[in-house]
Amino acid sequence: MSETYDWNSKVPAKVEEREFQLPPIGEYNFMVMSAEKTFSSNGNPMIKVRLDLQGAEGSVFDNLVISDKMMWKLVTFFESIGLKKKGEELSLSIGDAADKAVGLEGFCKIKHETYNGKESAKVDKYLVPTDKKAATAPVLNEDDMPFRID
């Protein structure tokens, strides 16, 4: 049975340890679960997003730093979730777009990185719908069809 906690709860003496499952490297559909406006360690404004990956357990966090050097990642994030069209300026401010991002879905490529001996999943890049490889059905001619069209 799950325990319910709040700010007034006591810290338990013992809890069940859960092992985190690292999502495999690959491309995933995701849903934006949160988009927190905060600051990076060097003082740049940043959006910390939590993405739930479709077909994988858990979430992946990504820090979208608002700087000239990292603007490419922020732009492709907004394109991936459909708030911005490729090649067009976004009509919203970055802050307003961050607020609207929660609940939207997009597509990303996940990679693994090792830092201080610990392996973690990271967003390698966001993919916009035109970047996705569309599956194409084979073209059938009339003689190959299993039925006749009149």
Image (tube, rainbow, N blue to C red):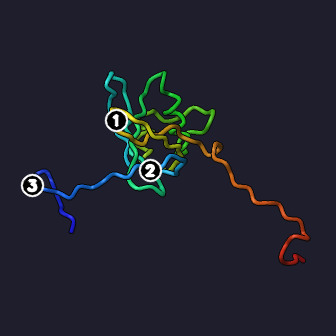
Instruction: Say which label, 1 or 3, has the lower sequence index.
Output: 3
Q: Vertical placement of 106 versus 117: above or below?
A: below
Contact, CB < 8 Å: mark 1 with mark 3?
Answer: no
Contact, CB < 8 Å: mark 3 with mark 2?
Answer: no
Which is in the foreground here, disc 1 or disc 2?
1
Where on the picture, by quarter, is residue 131? top right
In this image, 72 relative to 5: left or right? right
> 10 Å neighbourhood of mark 1: few (<14), some, or many (≥20)?
few
Label 3's element? loop
Q: Residue at x 87, y 76 (%)?
A: 149
Where on the picture, by quarter, is residue 46? top left
* Disc number for residue 117: 1
Q: Vertical placement of 73 versus 2: above or below?
A: above
Where on the picture, by quarter, is residue 6? bottom left
The residue where tag 3 is placed is: 13
In this image, 50 relative to 137: left or right? left
Per the model, the C-alpha gap separating discs 1 and 2 is 18 Å
Mark 3 residue type: Ala
> 10 Å neighbourhood of mark 3: few (<14), some, or many (≥20)?
few
Q: Residue at x 63, y 46 (%)?
A: 132
Mark 1 residue type: Gly
Per the model, the C-alpha gap separating discs 3 and 2 is 31 Å
The residue where tag 2 is placed is: 23
> 10 Å neighbourhood of mark 2: few (<14), some, or many (≥20)?
many
Instruction: Say which label, 1 or 2, has the lower sequence index.
Output: 2
Label 2's element? loop
